[in-house]
Amino acid sequence: QVQLVESGGGLVQAGGSLRLSCAASGRTFSNYAMGWFRQAPGKEREFVAAINLSPGSTYYARSVKGRFTISRDNAENTVYLQMNSLKPEDTAVYYCATDPAVGRLAVTGNGDYWGQGTQVTVSS
């Protein structure tokens, strides 16, 4: 049973930073791409970032490039999303996902397993 558990969300002022974590279990973490997505109220889920297998090519949505950094620790079975210079429009529930193919995460927005999400709220 594959499980993804996100943590690290919260309330932050605009310009601040947060680091999200996603702990994975149930299969060999290093064999799979990982990604982050978000969904704001009334909006569709959107791709944020993805990281391929080790050594980990990274991919970002245009809206977060230069502000967010995705990384992975295969020894800890964890993927991170460092979010800097946060804006009110970054407010959303953030989900991590995993898939054998990074293209499915980054291009088609699909993953074979998803976490439950963590709320990020950025106040102005």
Image: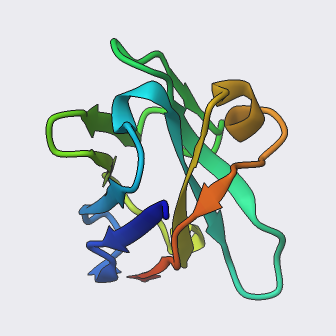
- Identity of the residue drawn at 48% across and 60% down: 2
Q: Can residue 91 be spotted in the picture?
A: no
Picture layout, residue 6 above or below residue 68: below
Q: State the image coordinates of residue 81 (x, y, percent, origin top left).
A: 35, 50
Q: State the image coordinates of residue 62 (x, y, percent, origin top left).
A: 65, 36
Picture layout, residue 12 above or below residue 37: below
| Quadrant placement of the C terminus | bottom left
Seen as rendered, the residue at the extreme front is: 1
Q: Can residue 97 be spotted in the picture?
A: yes
Picture layout, residue 98 above or below residue 39: above
Of residue 65 and residue 53, the one placed in the foreground of this image is: 53
Q: Locate residue 43 relative to residue 54 in the image: left or right.
A: right
- Identity of the residue drawn at 82% across and 76% down: 43
> Residue 4, located in which quarter of the rendered image?
bottom left
Of residue 20 and residue 22, the one placed in the foreground of this image is: 22
Picture layout, residue 44 above or below residue 79: below
- Identity of the residue drawn at 24% across and 33% down: 74
